[in-house]
Amino acid sequence: MTNHTITSIREGLRAKQFSAVEVAREALEFAERENPKTNAYLMFCPERALSAAAEVDRKLAAGEDAGALAGVPIAVKDVILTKGVRTTCASKMLENYIPPYDATAIERIEAAGGVIIGKTNCDEFAMGSSNENSYFGPVRNPVALDCVPGGSSGGSAAVVAQGTAVVSLGSDTGGSIRQPASFCGVVGVTPTYGRVSRYGLVAFASSLDHIGPFARNVKDSATLLAAMAGRDPMDSTSANAPVPDYGAQLTGDVRGMKIGLPVEYMKHATGETADRIHEAVAKLQGMGCEVQDISLPSTDYAIATYYVICTAEASANLARFDGVRYGYRSAEAGGADSNKLAAMYCNTRGEGFGPEVKRRIMLGTYVLSHGYYDAYYLKAQKVRALIARDFTNAFQTVDAIMAPVSPFPAFRIGEKVNDPVSMYLSDIYTITGSLAGIPCMSVPCGTTGTGLPVGLQILCNHFEEQKMFRLAHAFENS
Ligand code: GLN
């Protein structure tokens, strides 16, 4: 499994070197054997995988089109609903939740022949930057087992790095695809907001949530994104824009493309991370790109803005977990009398949510409360508009912006756990793109002296994923 790509599986199936069922069996066996090293998978779904693979084999035998993802073993972050397969959001609250429907992204992947083999660990309800907030224990970085894989989609990055899936799905609200991709040395893509339907993605902060791919190369990430993207009547924020043929854009020719380096980011970037970014940009310059400094003046306000908006939305979204309709209910639940009802809510939420989720619900409730709404939430929305405008202005003069993904590479498990503010501050380079809703990705650009991967972040204007993929692919092949 470790060397397979979407292309190699397609070619192997065509040449009858293996069947889709054989690939699925091998993938499941390998993943189950390797998983104790990283704790990246929370569960496997062999029945679903084998029946999807059998359908691919049937189509191939009948000479039908088996789809762009035919026979490809895929892992899915456990915040994306899979019908009949437990979906926990890495929370005690949903420990035994079995969804009655599939997310649109899942339906489309399976319609394209993809074989979903399991669900991956993550920070609880996708809140975190290290995957240490999971009720089911942290994930280890396959590149350095004493380090975090990043978060919140740490499991999805780890399985691709470890070779226990060919590609995977993550979700990104403020960096949760790009940052773990960077920490684990794989490609991770956050598409334009609305590019992929959020139907069936458990909501954290709805105006910021994205589903996106992880892969071991740019082409696979583009193929997986294309299979999921496009308008979905079940998500009114999904975009009606046509989905381009991303693969056709991977020409290797980047001559004349203009790259902007934000001075506000680069002045803080230090050490080996900054070195790798400068080297990467120099390489692209050598391939014919033009490089210039740009300014994103509202950057200083990004962290505060993001943590007001995302906690506000989280406090509203997570109100549904009340012990009544689904999910965990406290054993201390009372009967019909109103004191007991209140105790049921309190005990259920007190016992079902972990500390980071509670912290965010409290922060979010506070910034939305009467008297503080204008001072915090409304102000944050205004600053969000300024941050988005910075990007709009920058894209008048450049095709793409390049930056680090994270100020530092993967850190040791436990190192930052007791300092949530320093954890929040580490999201500085990723949350601006999320707030603006623009496509952004992380592509591996080398390692530190100790062998920890560093990711180059590429950001483009709304719906310009093609440009982003073209640059990333050209860089990858250099
Ligand atoms: N690290 C950020 C946070 O904790 C981003 C999370 C995400 O993108 N889901 O909110």
Image (cartoon, helix red, strand yellow):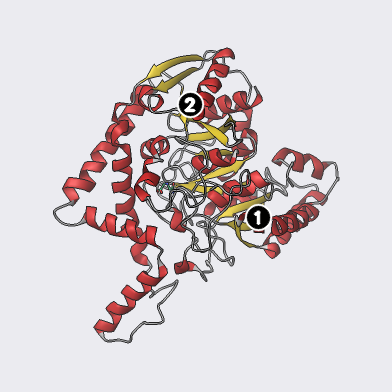
- Look at 76% across and 47% down and name the residue there: 64
Q: Secondary structure at mark 1?
A: helix
Specify the quadrant of the image occupied by residue 58.
bottom right
Mark sitting earlier along the chain (1/2): 1
| Image side of residue 261 versus residue 170, left or right | left
Tell me if mark 1 has few (under 14), some (14-19) or many (20+) residues whose alpha carbon lies within 10 angstroms of its own: few
Task: Give the residue pinned by disc 1.
Answer: 37
Q: Residue 398 versus residue 446: which sits nearer the camera?
A: 446
Q: Quadrant of the C terminus?
A: top right
Which label is found at residue 274?
2
Q: Is residue 244 visible?
A: no
Q: Is residue 88 visible?
A: yes
| Image side of residue 74 versus residue 20, left or right | left
| Image side of residue 62 versus residue 192, left or right | right
Location of residue 137 with respect to 304 vertically, above or below? below
Question: Residue 238 location, x and y as percent?
Answer: 44, 45
Question: Residue 152 location, x and y as percent?
Answer: 48, 50
Question: Residue 209 location, x and y as percent?
Answer: 42, 48
- Look at 33% across and 56% down and name the residue there: 360
CA separation in Å, label 1 and label 2: 31 Å
Amino acid at dot 1 = Lys
Q: Is mark 1 within 8 Å of ligand 1?
A: no
Specify the quadrant of the image occupied by residue 219.
top right
Amino acid at dot 2 = Ala
Q: Residue 143 versus residue 385: which sits nearer the camera?
A: 143
Location of residue 14 with respect to 460 vertically, above or below? below
